[in-house]
Amino acid sequence: MRLNDTVVALATPSGAGAIAVIRVSGTEAIKLVAPLFKAKSNKNIQDQPSHTLHLGNLVDGERILDEVLISIFHGPRSYTGENTIEISCHGSQYIQQEIIQLLIRKGARSAEAGEFTLRAFLNGKMDLSQAEAVADLISSENQASHQIAMQQMRGGFSNEIQRLRQELLDFASLIELELDFAEEDVEFANRDQFRDLVSRIQQVLKRLIDSFATGNVIKNGIPVAIIGEPNVGKSTLLNALLNEERAIVSEIAGTTRDSIEDEISIGGVGFRFIDTAGIRETQDIIEGLGIKRTFEKIAQAQVIVFLLNAELFKVQGSKFKVEIEKIQNKFPQKPLLIVANKTDKLSESEISNLKDSLSAAEGPDLIAISAKENIGVEELKAKLLEFVNLGELQNNNTIVTNSRHYNALLSALEEINKVQEGLNNNLSGDLLAIDIRQALYHFGEITGQVTNDELLGNIFANFCIGK
């Protein structure tokens, strides 16, 4: 990227709408737009203060392109830290393109993906972890992912990392100072205090690393595979969970030949439900391919909902228990939730006996529902939510959602463990300093104090144009 250029891009989603916002950023942004804008007040926007709005016409020579509202931001008091103009125009795609093309002809260039946020990072408006949180905030689709992204964008995560890094840096400076007086055998860094610091850093790093398990599922949604024999009501359950007719429902067994996926928010957390083909022995080639894909989806899921027909269980209980045991043995690490469907056709005593029978054999995770009558579906949703550790989120603790941050934290912990080992073995300051420098390096990777063009290119390439 040529970061000294003035860049322009549509900052709102492409397509027609009531209004669109076109963002222009760079040293020459205000100077470039000024001749093209005729304010109703006859003021020249080059003479106007920052953070002001101006109504007028945007013109191409004598031709009026649109009546627009222009927002002026003088650097460094702007999102990018540069002079910035935001043009609010009518949402016609034709008008949007006419304005953008006019600005390009006058000397701007089209912004690259994420270039505005990259400039904000390079100009010190935010650190790298905050910049990455911008993309997470844009893509957040539920309350939990939005809350985490907002917390990180406000600097919660980076502030915690910065505090640890600064404390470690202070001790590192003292140890480096000892190296200058090596012949005099002096000790500036109190080793007991240093051990306490290393222990505290280890605890924080472990907590952040452990939080990634929760953060990753909140960010990406929790995949839940709905499995069972044909015609037990898997598609009906999916429709009941989504509250819409998403999957075809039929009395004919084997209707679902391929997996169907959709996502909903439960308690602010995204769950991606996968309706799979019924598992049974079949000679039908197409259905067989669907069953093969079912097992692939089970392998990808984090939670398995095994749906069984409550009526059939009364006479085929042992068969179902064998099938459940097979799934448990094949996927021992995955939570398995056993759901008895079509219980609206049973009496309360029969449902109670069913629960007793399955609970005794398979454990407590059994829910009796009627997907068709929407009975017990809310209980099922509540049970699914129990598989997510929301304690840290509810306590507003820092939660790691970014795999790059996770890997850097793992590397930092590895180096801190080496420092602790060196302290325990009374290693000299010059050897301790090597591992401390490496730990500081990995801390710096997270916030962007240590970076390179390739890393920045990979991060900001995932942003949308205009952000």
Image (spheres, helix red, strand yellow):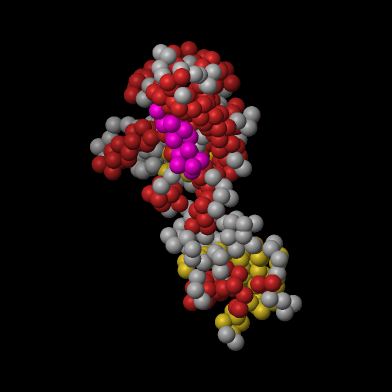
Residue nearest the viewer, comparing 368 with 403: 403
Determine if residue 144 is in view: no
Task: Count the labels in the image.
Answer: 0
x, y (%) of residue 316? 40, 21
Query: Looking at the image, which residue sits at the far front?
Result: 184
Where does the image place residue 11, in percent across and percent down from the top left?
55, 61
Q: Position of residue 408 (x, y in %)?
A: 43, 34
Q: Residue furthest right?
A: 41
Position above or below: 395 against 48: above
Quadrant assignment, res 145: top right
Camera-side residue: 290 or 120?
120
Q: Which of these two is toward me, 291 or 443? A: 443
In this picture, which residue range is highlighted in magenta? 434-450
Quarter of the image containing the N terminus? Answer: bottom left
Q: Which residue is at the far bottom?
A: 62
Magenta-drawn stretch contains 159: no
Is residue 118 found left or right of 77 in the rendered image?
left
Q: Residue at x 44, y 62 (%)?
A: 2
Q: Is residue 450 visible?
A: yes
Q: Which of 27 and 57 lies nearest the eye of the viewer?
A: 27
Residue at screen point 29% across, 31% down: 281
**Which residue is depicted at the point 69% across and 63% down?**
50
Residue 347 lies left or right of residue 68; in this view the side is left
User: Residue at point 57% right, 68% down?
Assistant: 29
Q: Position of residue 187 (x, y in %)?
A: 50, 19
Q: Report the magenta stretch's main SS.
A: helix
Q: Is residue 56 above or below residue 334?
A: below
Question: In the image, is residue 457 above or below residue 287?
Answer: below
